[in-house]
Image: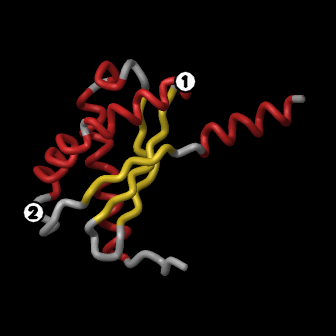
């Protein structure tokens, strides 16, 4: 069982979320096959070495393609992140991208409720 994140973890995660959102926004939708990519959550390991980055992708048909693009660009995104947070952290965390399916789930529930 995971323990609750420390204040430092939460602070670092929020900072990374803000910076990654900016990095992804600056690349533009064209870099992600015309999809809108939103960083919905970041969870960071207790030693601050790994960040789980949850992204929502709209439209959902492009999720697979965009996840592939994110993994291809992982090193350059991490490099840009390092330039932004390098002063606060000794090591720039590894980035693991995950699909945030909560929006799909909400849309699915909404569809079911309409029936």
Screen quadrant of the N terminus: bottom right
State the residue at coordinates (50%, 77%).
Answer: 2
* Residue 48 horizontal/vertical position (percent): 28, 70
Residue 66, horizontal then vertical, whole percent: 40, 30
Is residue 54 placed above or below 86 in the rendered structure? above
**Which residue, as the protein is rendered here, is positioned at the far right?**
115
Q: Is residue 16 above or below residue 62?
A: below
Q: Closest to the observer: 66 or 87?
A: 66
Q: Residues within 10 Å of mark 1 (few under 14, many from 20)?
A: few
Counting other residues with Cα less than 10 Å from the Cα at mark 2, is it few (<14), some (14-19), or many (20 or more)?
A: few
Left or right of 114? Residue 5 is left
Question: Which of the 4 image quadrants contains residue 71?
Answer: top left
Circles 1 and 2, Cβ within 8 Å, touching? The answer is no
Q: Quadrant of the C terminus?
A: top right
**On the image, which quarter does residue 107 sit in?**
top right
Q: Position of residue 28 (x, y in %)?
A: 29, 25
SS class, disc 1: helix
Q: Which sits earlier in the primary sequence, circle 1 or circle 2?
A: 1
Q: Is residue 114 left or right of residue 13?
A: right
Q: CA distance from mark 1 to mark 2?
A: 38 Å
User: Is 107 displayed left or right of 51 in the figure?
Assistant: right
- Classify mark 2: helix, strand or loop: loop
Residue 60 position by quadrant = top right
Residue on which disc 1 sits? 61
The residue to which callout 2 is attached is 87
| Closer to viewer: mark 1 or mark 2 | 1
Q: Residue at x 67, y 42 (%)?
A: 105
| Residue toward you, 46 or 41 | 46
Residue 14: percent from left, percent from top: 35, 59
């Amino acid at each position: 069982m995971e323990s609750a994140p420390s204040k430092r973890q939460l602070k670092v995660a929020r900072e990374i979320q803000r910076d990654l959102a900016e990095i992804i926004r600056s690349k533009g939708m064209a870099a992600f096959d015309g999809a809108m990519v939103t960083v919905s959550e970041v969870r960071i390991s207790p030693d601050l070495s790994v960040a789980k980055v949850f992204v929502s992708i709209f439209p959902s048909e492009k999720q697979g393609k965009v996840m592939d693009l994110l993994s291809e660009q992982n090193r350059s995104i991490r490099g840009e992140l390092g330039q932004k947070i390098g002063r606060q952290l000794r090591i720039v965390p590894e980035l693991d991208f995950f699909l945030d399916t909560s929006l799909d789930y909400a849309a699915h529930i909404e569809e079911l409720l309409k029936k």
